[in-house]
Image (cartoon, rainbow, N blue to C red):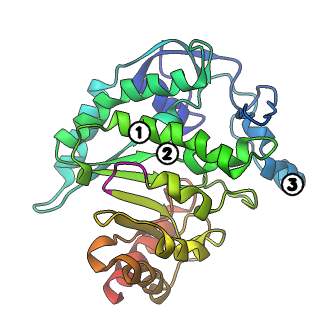
Amino acid sequence: MSNPVDYGAWWSYSFQRAAGLSLTEVNAFNEPPARSTPGNIRLTSFLDRRDRHLFPAVYAEAVEVGQGATGFPTTTGPITYRGQAAVASDIRHITSALRAGEQGFLTAIAPGSAARVRNDYYATEEEHIWAWADALREEYRAITDAGLILQLDDPSLAENFDQINPAPSIAEYQAFTQIRVDAINHAIAGLPKEQVRLHLCWGSWHGPHVTDIELKDLLPVILKANVGSISFEAGNVRHEHEFGVWADAAVPDDLVLVPGVVSHATNVVEHPDLVAQRIRRFTDIVGNDRVIASTDCGLGGRVHADIAWAKLESLGEGARRA
């Protein structure tokens, strides 16, 4: 089947890289709400998020991605990897753009986020996640074998919390998330740890985010991922205050922190001095050699391109000042 209409980067990316998917009319935006009970956590539909229930007027005015769309993938057969040519092309493009001494990175969807497509084939959600982990191993290895950093994008680790209705206990959610971290560790087994980075975010949609799980409750599970670095939101107003959580956490001695110090969530361009302050918060915790200043999440599609370039300029200048 031809590539689906790109209503969302995760959905089209998953479809183009894996066999076992079909286009269906039912998707995460139009399927009926699902209610969770203790011991039986289920993700509800995207439009049934708890944040949306708290701010119905806000979301009623927003453009709903995917409403009325039918071009979304569903797992209808065994998941196998078919993205060899696509990832090879990505690798050629990034490596050809690098200058001598530079190291590039490529993003790839993590198993837990990939498995958020609707599942009509595997008997359990966990089987579905592990099928994605087995399939995506090939893409991950291709990226690291090319000498690039593999960035595993996995917003599901934090974002799922808002998509469980009613809210689960912290212990239940930690167990729910541990399955997804275990799948990551399985998929990257044998890869050079220093070439694997995990990107953690809270979904990054432009909304109130009052139902986000707190970093202090999530970090103990995230730190069990066998990765060399972690990228995370540290510059938006909902999570900037949580830098202190890292000081209290059992951060591995070889883990590099990649905090977002300019944000996708505002059109205001951060002052370089603020960027420098944000960077120093983390160098004070783990030292200068273990911090890489970054963006909260992807800027593309969230702010105007001219604003994105201005934020990156401020990021560079703030790093120099720090």
Front: mark 1 or 3: 1
- The residue located at (80%, 39%) in the rendering is 48
Question: Who comes first in sequence, dot 1 or dot 3?
Answer: 3
Mark sitting on residue 184: 1
| 315 relative to 267 in the view: left or right | left
In the image shown, does 144 or 122 lie closer to the viewer? 122
Cβ–Cβ below 8 Å for labels 2 and 1?
yes
For residue 98, say whether it is visible. Answer: yes
Q: Nearer the viewer, residue 159 or 29?
A: 159
Is 144 left, or right, of 251 in this rendering?
left
Quarter of the image holding residue 133? top left
Q: Is residue 280 above or below residue 70?
A: below
Residue at x 77% of width, y 44% of height: 49
- State the mark number for residue 154: 2
Let me know if residue 72 appears in the view.
Answer: no
**Residue nearest the viewer, comparing 50 with 65:** 50
Mark 3 and mark 2 residues within 8 Å of each other at the beta carbon:
no
Circle 1 packing at 10 Å, graded few (<14), some (14-19), many (20+), is: many
Q: Position of residue 125 (x, y in %)?
A: 59, 24
For label 1, the SS is: helix
Q: CA distance from mark 1 to mark 3?
A: 33 Å
Identity, as a three-letter code, of the amino acid under mark 1: Ile
Of callouts 3 and 2, the N-terminal one = 3
Q: Which residue is mark 3?
A: 54
What is the magenta range? Answer: 224-228
Residue at the image point whose x is 55% and y is 53% from the top: 301
User: Label 3's element?
Assistant: helix
In which quadrant of the rendered image does the C terminus lie?
A: bottom left
Q: What's under tag 3, amino acid-wise?
A: Leu
Q: Is residue 275 left or right of residue 117?
A: left
Q: Report crowding for label 3: few under 14, some 14 to 19, many 20 or more residues within 10 A (C-alpha).
A: few
